[in-house]
Image (cartoon, rainbow, N blue to C red):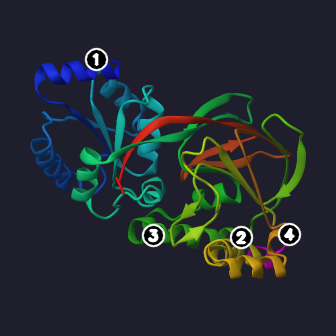
Amino acid sequence: MTADDKEQRADAAGDRRAAVIFNPVKEGVDELRTAVAAAEQEHGYGPSLWIETTEDDPGRGQAQQAAKEGADLVLAAGGDGTVRSVAEGLDDPSTPVGLIPLGTGNLFARNLGIPVNDIPAAVELAFTGADRPIDVLRARVRRPDGSVDTEVSLVMSGIGFDAAMIANTNPDLKKKVGWLAYVDAGIRAIPSSKPFRITHRMDNGRSHRSRVATVMIANLGYLPGNIELIPDAEVDDGRLDVVRLQPRNFFGWLMIWRKVAWENRVLRKSALGRQLIDLTGGDKRREVVYASGHSVDVVIEGAPEEFEIDGEEFGEITAARFVVDPGALTVRVPRS
């Protein structure tokens, strides 16, 4: 159903209709129902269509159903995985998506200024916010058996240490302390992490070989705890960002932490800080290497490596190609 068809249907019916795609096992569903009911009445929407996600289908089929039903607004209620699956199922970028964070990390919502601990405020924003076209990263990954899977990413994907950290996160600790469980998993994963070699190229250009602990392909740059992993990343710049972590030893990991937690987050915010980075050779160190473009190809040399998308483990892969799809998803964000 096109945007014009939706508008004509809304005019004929006298109201509009939202579809709420929600993870039933998340806390806050009852509060969500109350908030949506209030927003419907206040903003001239009819009763919403409520569609539960399942273990087998965390949002893709539900988004397709919402589109078929002619929803004027789709509310994705869950974590980053739910939002990613909803984005995968929506082919029409004119349908706005409201984010209702019910998960642990909610990195996508945090980077867009969505309230992450206030369900009524997030619902109100979904019904009244501004529409912002957001880039979607589309990936084709090759498995060890030669099969190929296609996925989408809104936050960032990781190959190597980053994915192993996700796989080693304690689920019980994650429920108790949220994103801090990833820090625990990362500390435990560092001693056993082993560097591996990759061949990579940006925008179908020249191929390069690197020895890395992990390579991440990102749509945004901020992590929880005010960690600015990729300073120049933007969710709507029509580009994807690649960061390679290349520590040679434990001291190298310390330099990585200094880079993302101190230089990127603090020093780069002022002219004096940038001069200090130049004087200390911060941008010349090779523990953290950045690149940006419209596509990237990564081929793993040797044994397959762990792979994750938007904080969810996806098994092992031997190669991946990422391409940015500019403005492929419309998200409701604060008007300011």
Instruction: Give the image location of residue 38, x and y in percent.
Output: 11, 49
Judging depth in this view, the residue of 145 and 132 nearest the camera is 132
Measuring 18% from the left and 47% from the top, which residue is drawn there?
36
Circle nearer the viewer, 3 or 4: 4
Name the N-terminal-most of marks 4 and 2. Answer: 2
Circle nearer the viewer, 3 or 1: 1
Q: Amino acid at mark 1?
A: Asp
Discs 3, 2 touching: Cβ within 8 Å: no
Name the N-terminal-most of marks 3 and 4. Answer: 3
Judging depth in this view, the residue of 143 and 263 nearest the camera is 263
In what quadrant of the picture does the N terminus appear? top left
Q: Is 94 above or below relative to 317? A: above
Instruction: Give the image location of residue 320, x and y in percent.
Output: 72, 38
The answer to which image quadrant residue 246 occupies is bottom right
Name the N-terminal-most of marks 3 and 2. Answer: 3
- Label 3 and label 4: CA atoms lie apart by 37 Å
Discs 2, 1 touching: Cβ within 8 Å: no
Q: Which residue is mark 4?
A: 284
Q: Which residue is mark 3?
A: 173
Instruction: Give the image location of residue 285, x and y in percent.
Output: 84, 70
Residue at disc 1, secondary structure? helix
Q: Amino acid at mark 3?
A: Leu
Q: Which residue is mark 1?
A: 5
Discs 4, 1 touching: Cβ within 8 Å: no
Magenta-tinted stretch: 247-253
The answer to which image quadrant residue 245 occupies is bottom right
Q: Which residue is mark 2?
A: 190
Name the N-terminal-most of marks 2 and 1. Answer: 1
Is disc 2 surrounded by few (<14), some (14 to 19) or many (20+) residues within 10 Å?
some
Measuring 55% from the left and 67% from the top, which residue is drawn there?
182
